[in-house]
């Protein structure tokens, strides 16, 4: 499993419980992370826009990751055009991880926001996955535009 935007690390701990002691979770975040007690969690401090996906896979998942999660959000300014541009650029980097680092049949979870880019992002994911669904967690505030796109079964 690969978790993009993994700081502060709580979701990494949930993921490692799901996969058990035989699996491995790799997390990347631009922010520093405190060491986590589980031995099968590997963290990298770095910017996903500057991370070589192929190199990451060679080091941690030569056949590709089974699951990629992404909870990254750009710093929102409140200026719709600026925020949409930043979200679009971020998705371009995340997409590279999907296309190069997620194995065929793999699954993907992406934090997204209802915005001008939403339909385009969902449409793109529909081309990459057998099914794409929209999920709004119960814990998310009603006024929040935060949602998750879940891609199941990467086309191979």
Image (cartoon, grey):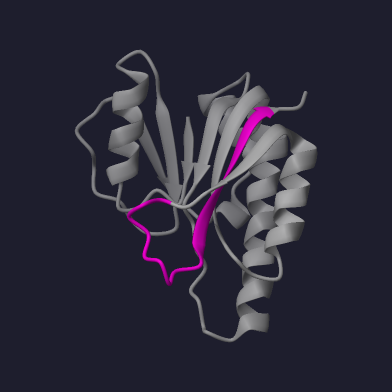
**In the foreground, 85 or 40:** 85
**In the foreground, 66 or 78:** 78
**Residue depicted at x 24% and y 49%:** 34
Q: Is residue 54 visible?
A: no
Q: Which residues are magenta?
A: 137-153
Q: Is residue 47 above or below residue 144?
A: above
**Residue depicted at x 59% and y 30%:** 107
Residue 103 lies left or right of residue 5; in this view the side is right
Is residue 140 found inside the magenta-colored segment of the image?
yes
Q: Is residue 18 above or below residue 88?
A: above
Residue 156 lies left or right of residue 102; in this view the side is right
**Residue depicted at x 40% and y 24%:** 24
Is residue 69 found inside the magenta-colored segment of the image?
no
Q: Is residue 32 above or below residue 43?
A: below
Residue 23: horizontal and vertical position, in percent?
39, 18
Residue 83 lies left or right of residue 8; in this view the side is right
């Amino acid at each position: 499993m690969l978790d993009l935007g993994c700081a502060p690390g709580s979701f990494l701990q949930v993921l490692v419980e799901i996969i058990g002691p035989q699996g491995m979770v790799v997390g990347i975040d631009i922010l520093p992370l405190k060491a986590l007690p589980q031995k099968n969690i590997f963290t990298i401090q770095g910017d996903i826009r500057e991370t070589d996906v192929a190199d990451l896979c060679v080091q941690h998942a030569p056949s590709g990751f089974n699951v990629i999660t992404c909870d990254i959000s750009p710093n929102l300014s409140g200026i719709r055009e600026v925020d949409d541009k930043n979200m679009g650029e971020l998705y371009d980097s995340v997409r590279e991880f999907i296309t190069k680092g997620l194995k065929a049949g793999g699954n993907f979870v992406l934090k997204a926001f209802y915005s001008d880019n939403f339909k385009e992002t969902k449409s793109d994911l529909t081309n990459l996955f057998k099914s794409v669904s929209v999920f709004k967690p119960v814990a998310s505030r009603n006024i929040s535009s935060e949602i998750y796109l879940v891609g199941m079964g990467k086309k191979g």
